[in-house]
Amino acid sequence: MKMAELSKASGIPVPTIKFYLREQLLPAGERTGPNQSRYGEEHLRRLRLIRGLLEVGGLSVAAARGVIDAVDSELPLAHSFGVAQRAVSAKIDPGDIDPAALAGIDRLIEGWQVSGENPGRLAAARVLETFAALGQRDEGSWLSRYAAAALLVAEADLDQVEARGSREAMAETVVIGTVLGDALFSGLRRAAQEHISTLRHPAPSELDRAPTRE
């Protein structure tokens, strides 16, 4: 298909597609003339991935390029996970975090095979540090239950990845699951919070709110 057809099929304007080509987010098409190229289904699929990373995942163009490069590489999947995690995580210097908060997270995830520079470990420690500064305490094993939920989600992520066939498909699922999975889980958590809070603390019905008559 020509670029105009690719634009129509993807819903992405031609100038935006040209921008993605210049930024090396989208591979070049097959040259058919001096100013003409042909694009295929792989370009349409890649455009959908780019849109998901930028618009839903909220990545910068540079971060999205790094994630896409990881998909296209032949490096181990663990490398792709690392690239995707760093893309969606704030850069945190371990030296800026209270050692007590880091120790608290390390106790919480004891037995997990996690590197010291893992962005999730550092981000969790930063949250723990902030909780302590605000005088918040771990009531009802809140932290350990979060850790248990995180393991369940991670297992679901890897099951989804391993269900794919080729290395490219697995790598693509890695980055989609990591980048968009954060947004998915955040949305589901908010919906679940409303559900549980409504069950535990139901609002008074209209009849209950009506004034009683003597």
Image: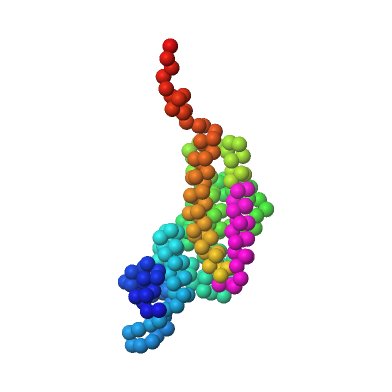
Q: Residue 122 or 148: which is nearer the viewer? A: 148
Q: Quadrant of the C terminus?
A: top left
Q: Quadrant of the N terminus?
A: bottom left
Q: Please, what is the dominant secondary structure of the magenta stretch? A: helix
In the picture, residue 169 is in which quadrant? bottom right
Residue 17: where, in percent of width, then height?
A: 36, 72
- Residue 19: in sight, yes or no? no
43 relative position to 120: left or right: left
In the picture, residue 23 is in which quadrant? bottom left
- Residue 190: in sight, yes or no? yes
Residue at 59% across / 51% down in the picture? Answer: 150
The chosen color scheme is: rainbow
List the single residue furthest toward the top: 214
Residue 96: where, in percent of width, then height?
A: 49, 51
Residue at 47% across / 31% down in the picture? Answer: 203
Q: Which residues are magenta?
A: 147-168
47 relative position to 123: left or right: left
